């Protein structure tokens, strides 16, 4: 599976970096939470989970694990129902409008499974904060290359929570919900940092490449 720009590392047509287009309110919130991109790594994103919260996540994951294929697909179908623009990122199935048909699509299933396997890895690394953060950070970097911007990530967490709730039935409690919400918030913050770092890197490479001879190109000084 891939998106229009998957793997190219280049995002044509992006002139204003996404990071520069944030609302003031968003940047202030990020700043208050210490989540601005550009912070020193590792440990740039404060780890929010207490030991009891980790246990709640691990316990519920043991049940969810048997349902990963189903959860992965439902999360993304609901994401496309509520935010159809997200589908445009996936060039292999963006032209399929019938969501029932899309449920059977093997590329969508594959992406659903990849997302779930990332969550599984995250659950397995709850006691290794640096590794967990690095994992999410790298995923954010690759999502810049997939042209999947951060504003969409939190929708995935919301849909994940509403999908797993009926599977866990009475095991789903406000405390379990809070633990999962904190985990997603943390992972999304690290993913966003990875995305912005990749964007900045790619922006500076592009601006170097775009400089004309005689207008300050570093090549002129060599
Ligand atoms: C919690 C949020 C998300 C997680 C955990 C996640 C996870 C993943 C993973 C594990 C991969 C496999 C490739 C890799 O490791 O780099 C992947 C690929 C990809 N993701 Fe996501 N993703 C998320 C959100 C999104 C969103 C919101 C979009 C689009 C709007 C998206 C679009 C893509 C695309 C186009 C690919 C490449 C094609 C593919 O592998 O299927 N992702 N994602």
Image: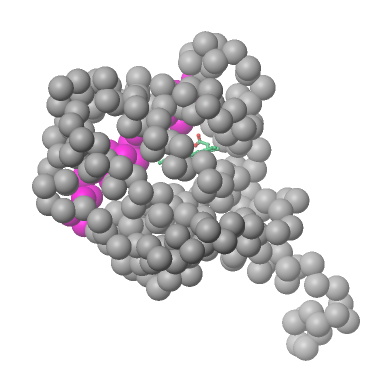
**Residue at the location (63% across, 48% down)?**
8
Please state, as top left, top right, bottom left or bottom right, where the N terminus lies in the image: top right
Residue 97 in the image, given as x and y percentages of width and height = 63, 17
The question of residue 113 being in magenta is answered with yes
Q: Is residue 179 above or below residue 83?
A: below
**Residue at the location (18% across, 31% down)?**
173
Which residue occupies the extreme right position in the image? 214
Q: In this view, does 102 lie to the left or right of 61?
A: right
Residue 29 visible, this angle: yes
Residue 128 in the image, given as x and y percentages of width and height = 21, 57
The question of residue 219 being in magenta is answered with no
Q: In this view, does 13 lie to the left or right of 128?
A: right
Residue 191 in the image, given as x and y percentages of width and height = 43, 52
Residue 87 visible, this angle: no
Quadrant in which residue 3 is drawn:
top right
**Residue at the location (26% across, 59% down)?**
47
Q: Is residue 6 left or right of residue 193?
A: right
**Residue at the location (43% across, 71% down)?**
39
Residue 149 in the image, given as x and y percentages of width and height = 56, 47
Please state, as top left, top right, bottom left or bottom right, where the C terminus lies in the image: bottom right
Question: How many discs appear?
Answer: 0
Q: Is the magenta stretch mostly helix, strand or loop?
A: helix
77 or 104: nearer the viewer: 77
Q: What stretch is highlighted in magenta?
A: 106-128
């Amino acid at each position: 599976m891939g998106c229009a720009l998957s793997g190219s590392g280049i995002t044509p047509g992006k002139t204003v970096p996404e990071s520069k287009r944030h609302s003031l309110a968003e940047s202030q919130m990020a700043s208050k939470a210490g989540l601005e991109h550009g912070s020193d790594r590792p440990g740039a994103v404060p780890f929010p989970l207490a030991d009891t919260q980790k246990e709640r996540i691990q316990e519920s994951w043991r049940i969810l694990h048997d349902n990963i294929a189903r959860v992965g697909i439902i999360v993304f179908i609901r994401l496309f129902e509520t935010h159809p623009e997200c589908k445009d990122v996936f060039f292999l199935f963006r032209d399929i409008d019938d969501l029932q048909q899309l449920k059977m699509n093997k590329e969508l299933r594959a992406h659903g499974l990849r997302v779930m396997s990332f969550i599984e890895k995250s659950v397995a690394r709850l006691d290794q904060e640096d590794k967990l953060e690095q994992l999410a950070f790298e995923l954010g970097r690759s999502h810049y290359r997939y042209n999947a911007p951060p504003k969409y990530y939190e929708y995935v967490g919301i849909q994940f929570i509403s999908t797993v709730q009926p599977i866990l039935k009475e095991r789903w409690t406000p405390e379990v919900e809070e633990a999962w919400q904190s985990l997603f918030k943390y992972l999304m913050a690290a993913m966003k940092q990875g995305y912005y770092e990749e964007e900045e890197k790619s922006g500076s490479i592009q601006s170097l490449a775009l400089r004309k001879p005689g207008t300050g190109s570093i090549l002129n000084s060599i």
